[in-house]
Image: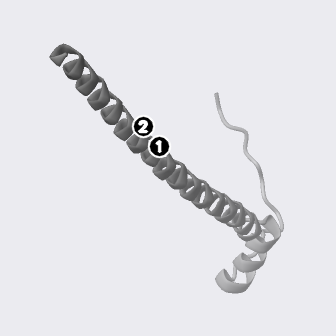
Amino acid sequence: MTRQLVTIATLSLAILVSAVAVVQAKHKTREMAHELQLERVERDKLSTEWAQLQLEESAWANPDRVAQVARRELSMVQPRNYVVLESQR
């Protein structure tokens, strides 16, 4: 009779430990899923910001704008006659 009680007590304890482990694993999974969602939102924000920065860079680097700034702010002019020399080998 005592052997049966020990077996039942051991199995009950194993079931209890198993149940607690399942609850902890489920909780950790939910935490990680929430964290993943937050990271995805951050990724999307950064992706949008990167696209905006690339667009802004292309606007600032536009050759017509660069020439306009060179003329207006730096008083640069394009020479009328210029010679292009071939590089010597």
How did the renderer colour the structure?
one colour
On the image, the x and y values in percent for residue 76 come to 70, 77
Q: Which mark is residue 26?
A: 1
Callout 2 crowding tier (Cα within 10 Å): few <14, some 14–19, many ≥20? few
Residue at (54%, 49%) from the top-left corner? 33
Query: Would residue 61 appear left or right of 37 to someone viewing this image?
Result: right
Q: Classify mark 1: residues with Cα within 10 Å, few (<14), some (14-19) or many (20+).
A: few
Q: Nearer the viewer, residue 77 or 52?
A: 52
User: In which quadrant is the C terminus drawn?
Assistant: top right
Q: Is residue 27 above or below residue 80?
A: above
Mark 2 and mark 1: Cα distance apart in space: 6 Å
Q: Residue at x 71, y 70 (%)?
A: 60
Type of amino acid at the residue the image marks with label 1: Lys
- Give residue 67's mark: none
Q: Position of residue 85 (x, y in %)?
A: 73, 45
1 vs 87, nearest the viewer: 1
The quarter of the picture where residue 50 lies is: bottom right
Q: Amino acid at mark 2?
A: Val
At a point 48% along the width and 44% down the height, the residue shown is 29
Question: Is 63 situated above or below 75?
Answer: above
Image quadrant holding the N terminus, namely: top left
Residue nearest the viewer, comparing 24 with 73: 24
On screen, 5 above or below 70?
A: above
Q: Are marks 2 and 1 in contact (CB under 8 Å)?
A: yes
Q: Which residue is mark 2?
A: 22
- Left or right side of 64 for 71: left
Q: At numbered mark 2, what does the secondary structure look like: helix, strand or loop?
A: helix
Closer to the camera in the image, 57 or 74:
57
